Image (cartoon, grey):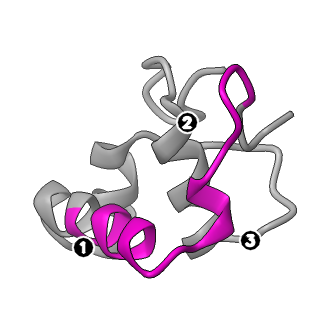
Amino acid sequence: MNCKKCGSPITADEAAITKKLINRGTTVYFCTGCLAAAFDVAPEDIRQKIEYFKEIGCTLFQNPPGETPYG
């Protein structure tokens, strides 16, 4: 899976934050940098949101070993 905008490989966390910020049913994913540009925030802000959602137990960020949030 690659970023729709820049083509870089997508991590499980990037796929999950795309689903959280864009649409839970999306099949198009964005890297942290491209998400940050789309929302006009710093990439660090996106990384902080990822950590926040992990800390509060968001199920999009809790995948069994070997599974990704995009299937």
Give yes or no for residue 49 being in the magenta stretch.
yes
Q: How many marks?
A: 3
Q: Residue at x 18, y 55 (%)?
A: 43
Q: Are marks 1 and 3 in contact (CB under 8 Å)?
A: no
Give yes or no for residue 40 being in the magenta stretch.
no
The amino acid on which the numbered mark 1 sits, given as a three-letter code, is Asp
Q: Magenta segment range?
A: 48-67
Disc with the residue nearer the chain's start (1 vs 2): 2
User: Furthest-bottom residue in view?
Assistant: 56
The amino acid on which the numbered mark 2 sits, given as a three-letter code, is Ala
Q: Nearer the viewer, mark 1 or mark 3?
A: 3
For disc 3, the marked residue is: 23
For disc 1, the marked residue is: 40
Q: Quadrant of the C terminus?
A: top right
Determine crowd level at label 1: few under 14, some 14-19, many 20+ residues with C-alpha closer than 10 A.
few
Q: Is 58 rendered above or below residue 10?
A: below
Quarter residue 54 falls in: bottom left
User: Which element carries disc 3, helix, strand or loop?
Assistant: loop
The amino acid on which the numbered mark 3 sits, given as a three-letter code, is Asn
